[in-house]
Image: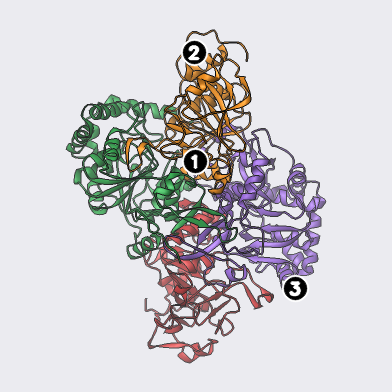
Chain colours: A orange, B red, C green, D purple
Amino acid sequence: MTTVSTLAEVRPDEVMTIAASRLLEDGKVMFAGIGQPLVAAALARRRQAPNLTVVLEGGMVGIHLLPGELPASTNEMRAAVGAEMLTSATDIFLLAQRGCFDYGFLGVAQVDAYGNVNTSLIGDPDRPKVRLPGPGGANDIISMCNETVIVTNHEPRRFVERVDWITSPGHLTGGDSRQRSGLLHGGPSWVVTDLALLDFEEESRRMRLRALQPGVTVEQVRRATGFELLVADEVSTLDPVTDDEVRLLRRLNGESDD
Amino acid sequence: MTTVSTLAEVRPDEVMTIAASRLLEDGKVMFAGIGQPLVAAALARRRQAPNLTVVLEGGMVGIHLLPGELPASTNEMRAAVGAEMLTSATDIFLLAQRGCFDYGFLGVAQVDAYGNVNTSLIGDPDRPKVRLPGPGGANDIISMCNETVIVTNHEPRRFVERVDWITSPGHLTGGDSRQRSGLLHGGPSWVVTDLALLDFEEESRRMRLRALQPGVTVEQVRRATGFELLVADEVSTLDPVTDDEVRLLRRLNGESDD
Amino acid sequence: MTTATLPFPGADTLDARLELEGRRRPREPKTMTAEEAIAGFVRDGDVVAVGGTNHARTPMALLVEILRQRRTGLAMSRPLTCYEAELFIATGMADRVVTSWVGIGHGWGLAQVLREYVETGRIDYQEWSHLGLGLRYRAGAMGVPFLPTYSMLGSDLGRRLQLVEATCPYTGQELTAVPSLNPDVALIHVQRADVYGNAQIDGYELMDGDVARAARRLVISTEELVDTDILRRDPARTVIPGFLVDAVVVQPMGAYPHECYGHYLADEEAFTHYMERVRDHGSEGAREYAAELVAHADHDAFLASVAPERLAALRKDAEGMMPQ
Amino acid sequence: MTTATLPFPGADTLDARLELEGRRRPREPKTMTAEEAIAGFVRDGDVVAVGGTNHARTPMALLVEILRQRRTGLAMSRPLTCYEAELFIATGMADRVVTSWVGIGHGWGLAQVLREYVETGRIDYQEWSHLGLGLRYRAGAMGVPFLPTYSMLGSDLGRRLQLVEATCPYTGQELTAVPSLNPDVALIHVQRADVYGNAQIDGYELMDGDVARAARRLVISTEELVDTDILRRDPARTVIPGFLVDAVVVQPMGAYPHECYGHYLADEEAFTHYMERVRDHGSEGAREYAAELVAHADHDAFLASVAPERLAALRKDAEGMMPQ
């Protein structure tokens, strides 16, 4: 795992997906969305977590993840054929509410210092500048899964002090505010970016830098973050991505045949 | 329908089942229990109501009703094979709660002047003299179906002023008491016995004699009723059971092969 | 007692039940054309629940027939909404959207027409969580005016929707109270049904079992009309009992250009065709596309306008993916 | 805020969830003997949810193994209860019953042992409506502490159970609040499962999908152990996902003498055998019958004690009834 990839042009999104996939433990259950989360799951299944069960919001449980044929939607044939169970879309979220899912994975348009996520709108909620797709399953995932991993490019416009709209609740205003809102479970545990791995400080629940992607400095992360970032006492460096990981990732994405 | 049966020994329970079956209209949906209700349904399906849909508490919808092979339980293979839909036991009652079922049919250990039904216990609820099977689906059926037909032998020990225990709510203490309890739908509409057909007077919601089985007198019905019975201004006489009905009933019950 | 007012129809299961009691749907043949079904069961101002999600089992033939007959003041309700809603917004037939997500997929990104109408404040856009909308349908299906859930707690969704809390009378725990939704009409596309409306869905049911139960009026379209005995062979697959159904429209490829599990994949070329128009002409492009669709006499005429080998390929690919 | 106290465990989904978070059930082979499964997952004082109803898919092999190992202070929870509960009452292992109905069926009338114990006040008997108990499981499965329903309003059931009302915060309507039930352990018999516990039920699911989701611990027995690929051919039939399951016991005819849809009918002779003992000796007869059952080393030994042609006939009759 410590062999630096010698492959030309490892892209930032590849580094991020690989870092996210490494968080997934074997035997667990992951509520995945389309795109990066699903690729991270497929990667983990072929490496450290062959018994990871992947669940989709369309009601699929234990889906097949074939290289080059990952589904383009959580609600389509490719996502369902080969699943171990198909249930209704509502019932899959009720399993989340019961506490059956170890991980949720979310992308964001904005995330704030307390891990609150916005995928709904930019600007004034009454007359948004940009109307975005909305929560889909994200509000439920971060409210109900045992922990939620946020995966996103690290940019100041995404990392903001307060999101314009809380689509999906993180630690709200920090401290025990999430619990006080009635959300007694889960919440964001990790934020994985192309620059770093971050968590949330135990007391304040503010985002905290824990580890850097190889070659990245703390200052770089600070500059890419639009709020005052906590930094752990010891900031480690993540293992560099390996040739094996990158090759496998590209094969899963249908970008190569080897 | 006015030909008197010439068959020897038409039993009181046969007269009652036939009278109940005549209430069932074509195209409707009936929540049936095992025994008399199911036989009444099978009879109606072969006579005036070929498009009657029969539902069972085991989750079966649109069941087959084969002569001599009527199921002995609402939760067994014979009740399920040939059904048009199988769903969960809870979901079948939720369809009742939604308002999908035209008729429920109930038997009773006791029924009172307001159509409250007891199938739970005789005596003191804290230390019953006789512990009976309990509601099964009956509480839900009478609470949720659009109307409920009570079918029972007419005996003073069954027709009591107040039941020992309200297993399944009828019109409670009469008037609008059922509505005031939060039960906004349905309730008992008819009581069919071996002696008579009864309904519930519109204002008081007390049980009222509407029609007599052939050969029965009002006085006979009064004597068989353990509470003061209302009598409609005009009491008619039910059409006598016909040979066809009796023969078909016995064939359905597996008592004859013709 | 304290009661809240909702910004949108809901929590009216009691009325929905009374409507059902007053208008039974007896067991009788219910097959009719899409034209008859829409004329009979879809009215101006309706809350329309659209079956399927995103590009799965979208009841396209029925939706386009609404466009053809024109309705006004519709609300389109669907947990994951695709471009079908944009056709109703752009043509002015819908002024309300109830959803948890809107997107086109297939690499096309944001829904541009919806953006335009929301950002200029021309439609009411009601954003629910996925489970929140799912439980609205479920409450409607169960015949209760609300259900408790953890969904939407702490977020801006519940605040904007003016949702109130449901307090557990045993524990004192406070959860979100989701109000029931009994749509005025639901349109659902299925793989097979009999003349009475007993219907089976293969693959993913999504929310359609609940939508069918919740709906005040229900029109289904089906790939295949089968004898009831076919349904009896696998009754656990019957998701919609006939007594819920008002109309059965037999329409092979009735979800095209969207997909239907086991029958055909979505036609990405059709998405491209639509999105290029929108990219080039904005909502006017969506109106042009809708005009093209309604110019066909019916869905069969629309299908006949597509290259047969393209349709055959979509069917072949879907059939080839099925488990053996 | 006002909170009510329940006369019985319930409305504790929060605790059930914390227990689940603290004890995950990773995907790994979970096959074991009934002896190991009961030893590992059934404890004194448990609320035991028994799968199936009446004489359908009763998890007999697992239940008799509990009798064999002996437990005390059990509560038996099942919507329609048959004689299996009487074995636990008569042997003093269960002192509580949660049900909507108890009866033997097959023309045998009332459950005499249960009558004796209830009428002499020796057990706690909790009578719910059928839907009431179903919604207790469903609330537990949904992870919410209560659900609203019309069930039990106006009757003596809710009054005696000390149920309180759930007020709709939108309409003010008052419904019964049914408290969740997350049984300590559930036992469910299914037609097929893989080593991870992914399980399919043929025919009528009854309440078992909810029971499995609600349970704090879950033991399934299966007629057949199959490769996961077999389940993938018809994934909509998978009612129990493996991540809910603690133990998989492979036990052909595991519901005998009760029925298992598609595999075998109930053995009426066995009912007669039991009921004649009870008729002649009351609850002592039930203890004798239980002693006979536990004298067999395991369920296979019990089956071996039955005339093979009798078992073959039950199987043949069931198979002959299946839709073609």
Q: Quadrant of residue C20?
A: bottom left
Mark 1 belongs to chain = A
| Dot 3: chain letter | D
Density class for disc 3 (Cα within 10 Å; few <14, some 14-19, many ≥20) is few
D247 vs D67, left or right, is left
Tell me which amino acid carries mark 3: Thr
Secondary structure of residue under mark 2: loop
Determine if marks 1 and 2 fall on one subunit. Answer: yes
- Cα separation, mark 1 vs mark 2, equals 33 Å
Residue at numbered disc 1: A169
Q: Amino acid at mark 1?
A: Pro
Task: Give coordinates of residue A100: x percent, y percent.
Answer: 59, 41
Q: Residue at x 63, y 28 (%)?
A: A26
Circle 1: is it few (<14), some (14-19), or many (20+) Cα within 10 Å?
many
Q: How many numbered markers are drawn? A: 3
Q: Is residue C223 left or right of residue D44?
A: left
The first of marks 1 and 2 along the sequence is 2
What residue is pinned by disc 2?
A10
Residue D243 can be seen in this image: yes
Residue D156's disc is: none
Which quarter of the figure is the N terminus of chain B placed in?
Answer: bottom left
Spot occupied by residue C233 in the image (x, y as percentages of width and height): 47, 46
Residue ID for mark 3: D120
| Discs 1/2, front | 1
Numbered disc 3: secondary structure? loop
Compute the Cα span from label 3 to label 2: 78 Å
Residue D243 rendering spot, x and y as whole percentages = 61, 39
Q: CA distance from mark 3 to mark 1?
A: 55 Å
